[in-house]
Image (spheres, rainbow, N blue to C red):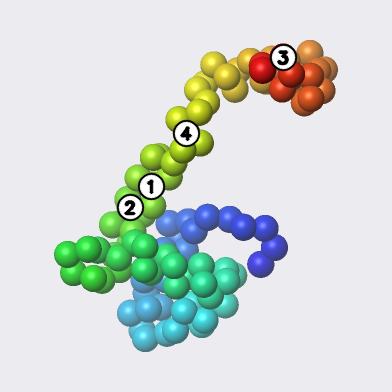
């Protein structure tokens, strides 16, 4: 459980099927290699509001929707990233790129 990685669709399949078999968050976390609180949070955040159950497709759609609305997506556009890549290819240091953009 080194670096944080978001839960994938295949992780969601495992969470769903293991939960259906009655396994706890701790057991599921061991299977997918995540922290138990990550699994618990996933189940709480992405359950269907009308039923209260965890469904794979709904959970993935909820997570993708939240990610697309995140603040960081509003700050930068493709042109910004294009400029950064262009300056880095010209052997500019990251500090020079930041100063230039400011």
In the image, 87 versus 19, the foreground residue is: 87
Distance between mark 1 and mark 3 Cα atoms? 32 Å
Q: Tags 2 and 1 in contact by the CB under 8 Å rule?
A: yes
Q: Alpha-carbon neighbours of circle 4 within 10 Å: few (<14), some, or many (≥20)?
A: few
- List the residue tagged with mark 3: 100
Distance between mark 4 and mark 1 Cα atoms? 11 Å
Q: Secondary structure at mark 3?
A: helix
Distance between mark 4 and mark 2 Cα atoms? 17 Å
Q: Alpha-carbon neighbours of circle 1 within 10 Å: few (<14), some, or many (≥20)?
A: few
> Does residue 29 appear in the picture of this structure?
no
**Mark 4 or 2 closer to N-term?**
2
In the image, what residue occupies the spot 47% across and 70% down? 39
Q: Secondary structure at mark 1?
A: helix
Distance between mark 2 and mark 1 Cα atoms? 6 Å
Q: Secondary structure at mark 2?
A: helix
Q: Alpha-carbon neighbours of circle 3 within 10 Å: few (<14), some, or many (≥20)?
A: few
In the image, what residue occupies the spot 74% across and 18% down? 99
- List the residue tagged with mark 1: 66
**Mark 4 or 1 closer to N-term?**
1
Numbered disc in front, either 1 or 3: 3
Percent x, y of residue 26 = 52, 81
Q: Secondary structure at mark 4?
A: helix
**Mark 1 or 3 closer to N-term?**
1
In the image, 39 versus 74, the foreground residue is: 74
Q: Quadrant of the N terminus?
A: bottom right
Q: Tags 1 and 3 in contact by the CB under 8 Å rule?
A: no
**The label number, if any, that marks residue 62 in the structure image:** 2
Percent x, y of residue 32 = 54, 70
Q: Give the quadrant of residue 100.
A: top right
- List the residue tagged with mark 4: 73
> Does residue 76 appear in the picture of this structure?
yes
Q: Quadrant of the C terminus?
A: top right
């Amino acid at each position: 459980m080194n670096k944080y990685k978001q839960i994938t669709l295949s992780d969601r399949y495992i969470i769903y099927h293991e939960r259906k078999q009655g396994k706890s968050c701790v057991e599921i976390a061991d299977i997918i290699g995540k922290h138990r609180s990550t699994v618990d949070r996933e189940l709480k955040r992405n359950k269907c509001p009308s039923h209260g159950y965890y469904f794979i497709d709904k959970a993935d759609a909820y997570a993708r929707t939240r990610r697309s609305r995140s603040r960081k997506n509003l700050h930068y556009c493709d042109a910004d990233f294009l400029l950064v890549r262009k300056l880095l290819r010209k052997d500019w240091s990251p500090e020079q790129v930041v100063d230039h953009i400011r």
